[in-house]
């Protein structure tokens, strides 16, 4: 045996360590985590959007900035822009604000550091969207989606026009989206751990979500429904663990109850004064719901049906058949992951949260005066992508096994 081979054989077994490798053997280079890379990419894109085409301020934007200014001056959760009947009914200036939750104005006041409030509001949105992109990439990894599909999901998120538009706005959507996605991804991660204080962040984020938008109540309801369902499905061996998770739902419930109590004390209504009852037709609301999903998918672009759209549709169908055929022949190694199965608990959690949230928004659209549209569903758009990734992964696996 050549002397060089003897040398490296001795090195491999030196100190009883058989893992010492020959220098000729390729080693895996250290790489930045995928979530960090997508967060940085989203940050660069949103900063570019902020510089080139920032979103204009809306009526709600001025309301948020006014409340943030009052918080910074130590006046409390009040507004000097008396626009809604609830605030006008107090007969005070400034008036206590309950039409909106105070979470986003509080974040803007904290981020301003005594400086420009508008810039601080846009900064909160930019950072929120960047962090959401990172969480989405992490969630896709936690669901164990195959590497071949993983990059497409955060890519669709960071290039969506509605997302980029929200990322440069003074609005609640980006921060609320961050809290919703953070809660779901945190709970998906908690499913892989033993019950400990490290499982709490997901529940805390869910509770904070309703302090940014009242729609956060629907997210909390979805999480509670998931934990109840898991408790019913769990066998005796895991019953104590599921009971501990169910007990932790008291954290977001307590945070939501605190907000409800403030509204009751301030205006005598748990809704915060949003009590105008309307009756929209179910059929009309169903059409608006479907259109909202289409517009959200297309980034708010006007729908037109011409040659480019037909080519895009044909290309998508052709690509789907190509992936399916390649998977069946085993010609795409990245699609073959024998020991890798989609996280069923994580998929179930995201599904229940999306269903309960969507049902809550549709009910609110039927009975209240909310501005029903794509922006109502933008906060759960990353969860749509999580579920889409899981579905495509399962489909590819089923085709490969057939």
Image: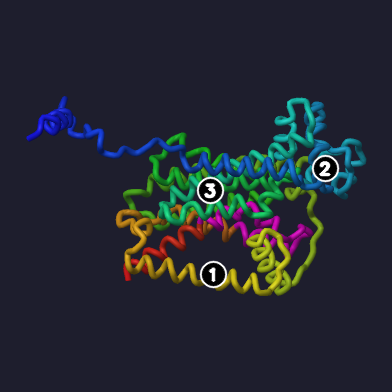
Determine which of the numbered discs, if any, sits on residue 358 in the image: none
The image shows residue 158 at horizontal and vertical percentages of 60, 50
- Residue 332 visible within the image: yes
Which residue in the protein does label 2 denote? 63
Q: Distance between the residues labelled 2 and 1?
A: 45 Å
Disc number lying in front (2 or 1): 1
* Mark 3 vs mark 2, CA separation in Å: 30 Å
Quadrant where the N terminus sits is: top left
Q: Are marks 3 and 2 in contact (CB under 8 Å)?
A: no
Q: In which quarter of the image is residue 207?
A: top right
The mark closer to the camera, 1 or 3, is 1
Q: How crowded is mark 2: few (under 14 residues within 10 Å), some or many (20 or more)?
A: many
Residue at the disc numbered 3: 136
Q: Which of marks 3 and 2 is nearer the N terminus?
A: 2
Total tally of numbered discs in the picture: 3
Camera-side residue: 332 or 175?
Answer: 332
Kind of element beneath mark 2: helix
| Local secondary structure at mark 1 | helix
In the picture of the structure, the residue carrying the numbered disc 1 is 315
Quarter of the figure with residue 362: bottom right
CB atoms of marks 2 and 1 within 8 Å: no
Q: In the structure shown, which secondary structural element does the residue marked by tag 3 occupy?
A: helix
Q: Distance between the residues labelled 1 and 3?
A: 26 Å
Residue 247 as seen in the image, left or right of residue 221: left
Mark 1: give few (<14), some (14-19) or many (20+) Cα within 10 Å. Answer: few
Q: What stretch is highlighted in magenta?
A: 357-386
Is residue 361 magenta-colored? yes
Query: In the rendered structure, which disc, 2 or 1, sits on the residue that comes first in sequence?
Result: 2
């Amino acid at each position: 045996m050549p002397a060089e081979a003897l040398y490296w054989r001795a090195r491999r077994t030196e100190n009883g360590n058989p893992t010492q490798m020959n220098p000729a053997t390729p080693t895996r280079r250290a790489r930045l985590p995928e979530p960090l890379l997508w967060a940085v990419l989203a940050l660069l894109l949103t900063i570019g959007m902020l510089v080139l085409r920032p979103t204009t301020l809306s009526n709600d934007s001025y309301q948020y900035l006014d409340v943030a200014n009052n918080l910074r001056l130590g006046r409390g959760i009040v507004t000097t822009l008396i626009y809604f009947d609830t605030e006008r009914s107090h007969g005070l200036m400034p008036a206590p604000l309950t039409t909106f939750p105070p979470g986003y104005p509080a974040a803007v006041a904290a981020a301003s550091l005594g400086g420009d409030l508008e810039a601080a509001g846009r900064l909160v949105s930019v950072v929120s969207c960047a962090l959401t992109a990172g969480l989405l990439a992490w969630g896709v990894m936690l669901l164990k989606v195959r590497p071949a599909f993983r990059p497409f999901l955060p890519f669709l998120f960071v290039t969506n026009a509605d997302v980029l538009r929200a990322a440069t706005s003074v609005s609640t959507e980006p921060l609320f989206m961050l809290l919703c996605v953070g809660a779901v991804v945190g709970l998906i991660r908690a499913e892989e751990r033993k019950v400990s204080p490290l499982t709490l962040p997901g529940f805390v984020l869910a509770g904070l979500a309703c302090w940014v938008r009242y729609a956060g109540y629907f997210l909390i309801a979805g999480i509670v429904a998931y934990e109840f369902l898991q408790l019913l499905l769990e066998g005796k061996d895991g019953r104590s663990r599921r009971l501990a998770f169910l007990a932790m739902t008291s954290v977001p419930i307590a945070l939501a109850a605190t907000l409800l109590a403030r509204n009751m004390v301030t205006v005598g209504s748990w809704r915060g004064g949003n009590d105008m009852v309307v009756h929209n037709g179910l059929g009309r609301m169903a059409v608006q719901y479907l259109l909202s999903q289409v517009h959200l998918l297309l980034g708010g672009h006007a729908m037109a049906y011409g040659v480019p759209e037909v080519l895009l549709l044909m290309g998508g169908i052709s690509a789907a058949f190509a992936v399916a055929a390649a998977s069946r022949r085993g010609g795409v190694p990245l699609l073959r992951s024998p020991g890798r199965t989609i996280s069923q608990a994580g998929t179930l959690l995201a599904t229940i949260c999306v269903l309960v949230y969507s049902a809550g928004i549709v009910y609110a659209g039927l009975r209240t005066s909310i501005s029903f549209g794509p922006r109502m569903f933008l906060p759960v758009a990353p969860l749509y992508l999580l579920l889409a990734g899981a579905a495509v992964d399962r489909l590819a696996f089923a085709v490969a096994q057939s």
